[in-house]
Amino acid sequence: MEVVGTILGVILGGLITWFIGSEQRKHDLSKEKRELLLSKYEELHSLLGKLQGHVNEMVMQIVTEASTNSKFDPKAIKSQMPLEQITMLIEFYVPELKKDHEYIKKQTKFLIEHVCKHIMEVDKTKEFLTESAVMAHELSKATNNTVTSMKSILAANASALLENA
C-alpha cells in the first residue's frame, strides 16, 4: 500500500507541476505578445507622426511661396514618407486601420501630384499660388484628421492591452 501511495503522490505531484508550468508558459506568451503589440503600436504611432510632419512640410513650402513670394525649394523636403513601413505594421498588427490607411495613401498621392504640378508650373501668378496653397492645405487637413483618428485608435488599443495586463 505504501508503494501505491508513493506512486500516486509522484503522479499527482507531476500533474501539479505540469499544470503550473503550463499556466506559466501561457502567461509568458501572453506577456510577450502584449509587449510586441505595444512596441508595434508605438512604432506605428511614431511613423504616423512622421507622415503628418512630411505632409505639413510640403504644404508649408507652398503656403510660404504664396505668402512671401519666395521660391519653392524641393530640396528642403528631405524626409521620406514612411508609407511602406506604415502599410506593413497595419497589415500585420492593426488591420482595423486598413480603410483609414487606404484613404491616407490616396490623399498623400493627390498631395504629391499637386506639389509636382506646383513645382513644374512656369507662370506662377498670385492667383495660381493662392489656389495652390488652398488646395494643398485642404489635402493636408483631410490627411491630418485621419492620422489623428488613427493615433487615437492606437492609443485606445494600447490602453486596453495595458488594462488586461
Image (spheres, rainbow, N blue to C red):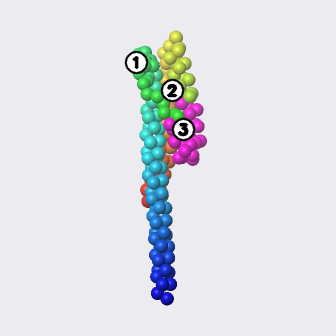
Residues under labels 3 and 2: Cα distance?
Answer: 23 Å
- In this orientation, which residue lies closer to the viewer: 163 or 53? 163
Residue bearing mark 1: 68
In the rendered image, residue 101, in percent from the top left (x then y), is placed at 56, 39
| Sooner in the amino-acid sequence: mark 2 or mark 1 | 1
The magenta-colored residue range is 85-108
Could you tell me the amino acid type at mark 3?
Thr
Q: CA distance from mark 1 to mark 3?
A: 37 Å
Q: Of discs 1 and 3, which sits in the foreground? A: 3
Dot 3: within a 10 Å radius of its alpha carbon, few (fewer than 14), some, or many (20 or more) residues? some
Q: Position of residue 85 (x, y in %)?
A: 50, 36
In the image, farthest residue toward the top: 123
Q: Main secondary structure of the magenta part?
A: helix
Q: Does residue 163 sit above or below 12 in this rendering?
A: above
**Residue under the image location 57 percent in, 46 percent down:** 95
Q: Name the outermost residue toward the front.
A: 3
Dot 1: few (<14), some (14–19), or many (≥20) neighbours within 10 Å?
Answer: few
Q: Earlier in the sequence, mark 3 or mark 2?
A: 3
- Image coordinates of residue 51 in percent, x first then y, are 47, 34
Residue 107 is inside the magenta segment: yes
Residue 66 visible, this angle: no
Residue 116 position in % (x across, y down): 53, 20
**Relative to the observer, which residue lies in front, 91 or 52?**
91
Amino acid type, callout 1? Thr
Instruction: Indicate whether 30 appears above or below 6.
Output: above
